[in-house]
Amino acid sequence: MLLDYDRMGWLKIALLGFTALVAAFLLLPVVFIVLLSFGSSRWLAFPPPGWTLKWYQELFADPSWLEAALTSARIATMSAILAVVIGLLASFALVRGQFRGREILRGLLLTPMVLPVVVFAIAIYAFFLRMGLGGTTIGFVIAHTVLALPFAIIPIATALEGFDKSIEDAAIVCGASPLEAKLRITLPSIRIGIFSAAIFAFLASWDEVVVAIFMASPTLQTLPVKIWGSLRSDLSPVIAAASSLLVGLTLALMVVTALLRRKFQR
Amino acid sequence: MTQPFLSIRNLRKAFGAITAVHDVTLDIPKGQFLTFLGPSGSGKSTTLYAIAGFQDPSSGDVQLEGKSLLAIPSHKRKIGMVFQRYTLFPHLTVAENIAFPLRVRRRPEAEVKKKVGDMLALVRLESFAARLPGALSGGQQQRVALARALAYDPPILLMDEPLSALDKKLREEIQAEIRRIHRETGVTILYVTHDQEEALHLSDRIALFRDGRIEQIGTGEDLYLRPATDFVAGFIGNSNFLAAEHLETVGGAATVRLADGSLVSGVNANGSLAPGQKTRLMIRPEALRLDRGPKTVELVVDIIDVAFYGERRRIVARTSTGQEIDIRPTFSATASHDVAPSQRQVFFDPSAAFLFPA
């Protein structure tokens, strides 16, 4: 190979250093937030003069934080379920279907991933105001489902592409109806893809802030919206604590996904 | 004549402008092992898929005991099928795979258990019941697939090149298993392969496909010993084709003049041949011998190479017109086995030679 890592000599060190810098650049802000959430300084001074859990106490004592977290979880769960169901049906069409405009449909379904979020947010905000869906849970869920859909379709379609259709045909010759064959054989065979889709779709909604700001109302706030709102009124370490929890859950879900993948793939 | 068990009537299948199957008509008696043999693209798999219900024929009919199957969807056709690729359900154990067709039919659990045991015994994989397909070899997977296909006692078993992914030794081993299972269960088997040895080894009857039509149908011996066309002769077994001019045919026995000018009488003629017509004379390598026999004629050759293959010798010779021929004399107690360096002729019985239009 032209660029063989083992033969790069001193370049190896430079490359390692560069990679470390990039990783630090990406991760350090998160590490600082987490550290600050345990720091005793009200003004987020670093290094913290002492260590404390009082910001977490304050966080859990305030019912509006808990409510925001529950709202986030509820909307993320519903969006994930919808995105997986729609993503599953769409994947069958994209992978198995042979029709004109299939590639266009694929592109269309994946646009929410590349479209500037703020453009999408304004468009759907204006549309939902007209439909009377602004500030409602349903509106929120629909908006987030659209955003989550690409994250559901990609792993499911990939899994379905890797699944030999002859296996489904075999189930049909065995006497299963085409639907039964899909439910009993195909879906369990691509369950890693479906599971990943659910996690990614959940996370796409869970930590989404731009569309959420447009969808939110004073009575309907997700955790990222609440963090954003609080950040503008006062800079309190409670926000750092809330952010840490947000990051914590995301990390936990990613780890679970990775572990399950490894287990299934053996 | 009694009603045939499975009957294919004037089956035709076109994909757009391409016609994969032209006009296939065929009756299969109950319990027969029939093989669709042919090169790839000859229409054998398409015909099988029409029987399975995966492809609707453009015209024609498939009938089981006199009733058309075409309106019946695949999952209600009561067929078992083993595919070319490994199609075990990856998330189910071997036993659950075999139980699947029974569970789909909501058979009582006691029956399912007993049948799974019987089937595992049939393919001799009793100790693998709890394994997942991923932990089995290719040959074992195909045996489980066979057990699964037979689990609910379908009257017809379809097999689409089930051994093509396996190596030669394993293939022969499983061929023996399939023969035994056919004997023990009496199921009617339609088997697709492009491997003529496999077809000869397994089948009661072979339908040789070419370009979407059946070129010849008969037992392996029919096709080997009495090929109807030069395509059949060339596809089944090994053969030498010598250019010949047809002189006359009397009662199915023809007289020809070979390229070196020699005359041979008493060869089998197929179809009607005109005097003077250009033809090809087919002689199997093992019909050529090194010594003169009671009814043999001789062929003048130069012997180029002699190779020893254990059970037989393979000799390459060249005729006076420069054509290479393949000779595989069978060892026998009376025949001479040695090739003298000076030997200039080989011999054959004209009744073992076949004449086809060129």
Image (cartoon, helix red, strand yellow):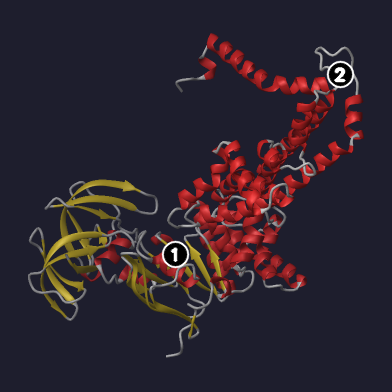
Observer-nearest of A146 and B177: A146
Residue at 76 percent across and 32 percent down: it is: A229
Discs 1 and 2 lie in a common subunit: no
Amino acid carrying label 2: it is: Arg
Outermost top residue: A10
Where the N terminus of chain B falls, by quadrant? bottom left
Q: Is residue A129 visible?
A: yes
State how many labels appear: 2
Identify the residue under disc 2: A42
Q: Secondary structure at mark 1?
A: strand
Question: A78 or A261: which is nearer to us?
Answer: A78
**Residue at the farthest bottom position:** B1
From the top left corner, tell me how far across and down residue A19 is, in percent: 60, 18
User: Does residue B203 appear anywhere in the picture?
Assistant: no
B101 sits left or right of B293 in the view: right
Instruction: Return the chain for callout 1.
Output: B
Give the alpha-carbon distance from disc 1 to disc 2, as whole Å. Answer: 79 Å
Q: Nearer the viewer, mark 1 or mark 2?
A: 2
Kindly identify which numbered label has been placed on residue B192: 1
Amino acid marked by disc 1: Val
